[in-house]
Amino acid sequence: MNNPALNTATQHRLHDLAKAEAERLRRQAIHDFANETVDEFWRGANAIWQRGQTTAERSATRLHARLARRAS
C-alpha cells in the first residue's frame, strides 16, 4: 500500500497544516507581545503619574505652609 500519490497528497496537506499553525502562532506571538508592551507602557505611565501626584501634593503642602508663615 505504498501509493506515491497518496503520500504526496498527505505530505502537502501536512505541510499546509504546519504552515497554517506556524502563521497562527506567529500572529498570537505578535498579539501577546503587543498586549504586553501596551500593559508595560501603561504601568510606566501610571507610575510616572503617581510620582507626579506625590510631588504636586508635597509642593502644595509646602506652598500652603509658606503662605501661612507669611500671613502670620
Image (spheres, rainbow, N blue to C red):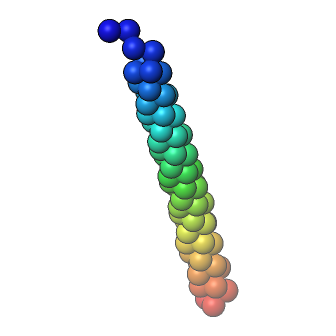
* Viewer-proximal residue among 68 and 27: 27
Write the residue at 48% across / 28% down.
12
Write the residue at 55% across / 69% down.
53
* Viewer-proximal residue among 66 and 46: 46
In which quadrant of the rendered view does residue 68 lie? Answer: bottom right
Q: Which residue is situated farthest in the bottom direction here?
A: 71
For the N terminus, the image quarter is top left
Write the residue at 59% across / 77% down.
60
* Viewer-proximal residue among 9 and 30: 9
Residue 4 left/right relative to 42? left
- Tell me, yes or no, if residue 22 can be seen here: no
The percent position of residue 35, horizontal first and vertical second, equals 50, 52
- Tell me, yes or no, if residue 71 can be seen here: yes
The percent position of residue 71, horizontal first and vertical second, equals 63, 90
Residue 22 left/right relative to 67? left
Image vertical order of residue 62 relative to residue 70, above or below: above
The percent position of residue 20, horizontal first and vertical second, equals 47, 38
Q: Which residue is situated farthest in the top direction here?
A: 2
